[in-house]
Image: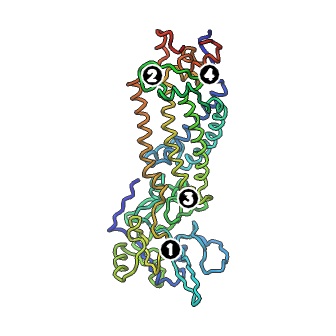
Amino acid sequence: MSNYIERFSTSERVLHWIVTASFFTLLLTGLGLYSTLFNGYFTLFGGGRNAILIHKISGVLFFLSSLYMFFNHQKDVSSFDQDDKQWVTERGGYLSRNASHFNIGKYNPGQKLFAIFIAAATLVLGVTGLFIWAPTMFPRWIVQLSLMTHGLMFVCSIMFVVVHVYLATIGNPGTIEAMLYGNVRSLWARKHHPKWYREVTGEKP
Amino acid sequence: MADTINQAARKGILVDTARCIGCRSCQVACKQWNKLDADKTVNQGTFENPRDLTSALYNRIRFVEKETPEAVTWRFLNERCMQCGDAGCIKVCPSPGALYRTKDGIVAYNKEKCISCKYCVSACPFNIPRYDANDKVSKCNLCQSRIDGGMTPACAKACPTEALKFGKRNDLIARAKAAKKEIYGENVLNGLGVAYALEGPPEQYGLPPNPSIPLSIFLWKDVIKPLGILGFWGSIGAMMLHYVTIGPKKVDDDLNNKEGGNE
């Protein structure tokens, strides 16, 4: 038995970091547009006009790469089974100090819902972003609604991303390796995703 | 940026539509003072020309033609930025100093600070701001440079009938009310700097009866924006709290517990 098993292939990891990089570019260029409180972030890009331009470019990149990432994993993240149900009932064991054990496949329901949410948010942010891109070409009410929805979806996204980053780093030590080198320790896989571990290794329970 | 206004110091224009003869001296004087080129227009069978505000047309006379069996009635409305006391454009502008309030209560702008986001276009209750060829905001600023120099805005100066009257906003409104005129824009949006004495209901002039900052713009800037900042820091706080109370799920925990993960 090897100490490590592969969780994400090189292309999956590169795609994930493209999504990450474009997300944080969007965040930094968009902060100044979100509120004048964050006007200073414009200087990172040489002023508001440039920030808007970079926001548009990275927006297209994020839209395409994020949706592509979702479709890559669509099969794994869009079906839920009985073991997932138990995970949801017990909140994944995250609200208790007691050790909890779930028979989880490659992704747990939290990860699946996060993937679905981000895909939906990508769609909404992309479509509303298009209206905001050229506001004088569309009816005023559509642009007004888009400005509000774009802000709302951003807020939801950044809050989910905070949780995502926490759970993938210090919240679950060992997880980040899957996204950095692609391999996770067998012990990690057996603890967090036992069903997936058995599928990959062929080990009997 | 907080948009505060000193009502007592506000200067403005009172548009008395009953006095307007539709001569459009205001349009011409505005173009002259602000050095704006003429727009190419086409004859559309009405004296109204041009048919809409442009980035080179800060004010214009809207011709409201109404035909009855007996006669044709004409009403004239001077259409322009109304210098709202609660200005949607200032509220949404992400570039400090691009759209701002002067000490006279005027909604002024600085093209050099405009970052071309066009948020003001969506936030205006009256659909006034236009963007010029350089993608910069343009609209009436009541000839800010003239007011700063102690002069009357070009349009009011040129108006031969005093349909456009410039002065202290409070005085203008008090005088119009003393003359038993119906005022449009006395209190809405914290008072319009350009208020109207109309001869009929505002709808007849194509004015919204109860103008307000669009609901989605209000929700965006006054609800989602502050709650979003709270939500962001709240989620970070929640994660930190989770880490120090419940703690991380360490794989090593199970080293001493052989059944771990194997159920």
Specify the subunit that label 4 lies on: A
Which subunit holds the residue at mark 1?
B
For this rendering, which residue is in front, B123 or B140? Answer: B123
Identify whether A142 is placed above or below A157: below
**What secondary structure is marked by label 3?**
helix
Could you confirm whether marks 4 and 1 are on the same chain? no
| Image position of B47 (left or right of B88) | right
Q: Are marks 3 and 4 in contact (CB under 8 Å)?
A: no
Do marks 3 and 2 both belong to one polypeptide chain?
no
What is the CA distance from the residue labelled 3 to the residue labelled 4? 46 Å
Q: Earlier in the sequence, mark 1 or mark 2?
A: 1
* Secondary structure beneath label 4: loop
Mark 2 sits on what residue?
B248
Q: Is residue B83 left or right of residue B70?
A: left
Q: Which mark is residue A7?
A: 4
SS state under label 2: loop
CA distance separating discs 3 and 2? 46 Å
Mark 1 and mark 2 on one chain:
yes
For this rendering, which residue is in front, B46 or B29? Answer: B46
Instruction: Give me the chain letter of mark 3.
Output: A
Amino acid carrying label 2: it is Pro
- Disc 2 from disc 4: Cα separation: 21 Å
Q: Are marks 1 and 3 on the same chain?
A: no
Looking at the rendered structure, the kind of residue marked 3 is Trp
In the image shown, does B71 or A162 lie closer to the viewer?
B71
Relative to A35, say whether A23 is above or below: above
